[in-house]
Amino acid sequence: ITQLDKAIKQLLPNPAKMRLRLSRTGKEISLGVYVLFSLVSAALGLVVMHTFVGLSLGPATLIGVLLGVALPHLFVGFMIKRRKKKFLGNFPDAIDVLVRGLKAGLPAAESMRIVGAEMTGPVSQEFTRITDGLKMGAEFDDILWAAAERIDLPEFNFFVITLTIQRETGGNLGETLENLCDMLRKRRQVK
């Protein structure tokens, strides 16, 4: 698959955008696997349309190519949407855990580690990635903004902005996050 990845880098105009889209699924899907899935979908579409539906080779090939492009794109979109929904469902609870840790006197990074350990699903996955990045020595703001780009939710972006501003200006982070949590829950009720 690494050879396929090299070929894809040459063929795709912007593989970084596709990698980012694939990372938003929360799964380890390489570009090679994605393209392989596209090719298999196209081939199956061609065979089904030509053999079972009885279309001539030209239209069957066109439909196969369309299926090869559309099916993987739609499937990845479905996975991203499902992951975002799960993340939003647990995010206010994660902020509650974070606030409790801060009120207990723990630093923000340690409170985030607890969120990663206590929560499940995409929230746990992302907070664990954040704390792992901090352990490796990366900058706090850089890790948060990378997570915000992966998660791609306005609610998480607001969380990152809140933490970034709070680190620069100081003040009561626990109270600020409690207000954010209340706002997120009210917003969910309105939806």
Image (tube, rainbow, N blue to C red):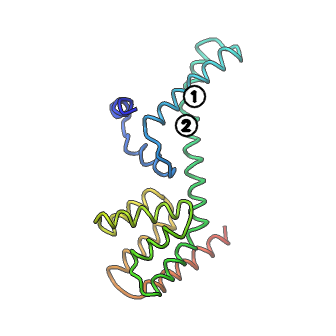
Q: How many labels does the image show?
A: 2
User: At 36% from the left edge and 64% from the top edge, which residue is drawn?
Assistant: 143
Do the residues under discs 1 and 2 have CB atoms within 8 angstroms? yes
CA neighbours of label 1 inside 10 A, class few (<14), some (14 to 19), many (20+): many
Look at mark 1 in the image and give the residue it sits on. 41
Which sits in the foreground, 14 or 37?
Answer: 37
Q: Residue furthest front?
A: 117
Q: How far apart are marks 1 and 2 (CA)?
A: 8 Å
Tell me the quarter of the image containing the N terminus.
top left
User: At 33% from the left edge and 69% from the top edge, which residue is drawn?
Assistant: 140
Q: In this view, does 156 lie above or below 64?
A: below
Q: Which residue lies furthest to the right in this view?
A: 53
Kind of residue sitting beneath label 1: Ser
Look at mark 2 in the image and give the residue it sits on. 72
User: At 57% from the left edge and 77% from the top edge, which residue is drawn?
Assistant: 183
How far across and down, in percent of the image, does residue 16 sit? 37, 44
Q: In this view, does 125 lie above or below 164?
A: above
How far across and down, in percent of the image, does residue 89 sit? 61, 66
Question: Where, by quadrant of the figure, is residue 139 drawn?
Answer: bottom left
Q: Is residue 77 above or below residue 177?
A: above
Find numbered disc 2 in the image and state the secondary structure of the residue it sits on: helix
Circle number at residue 74: none
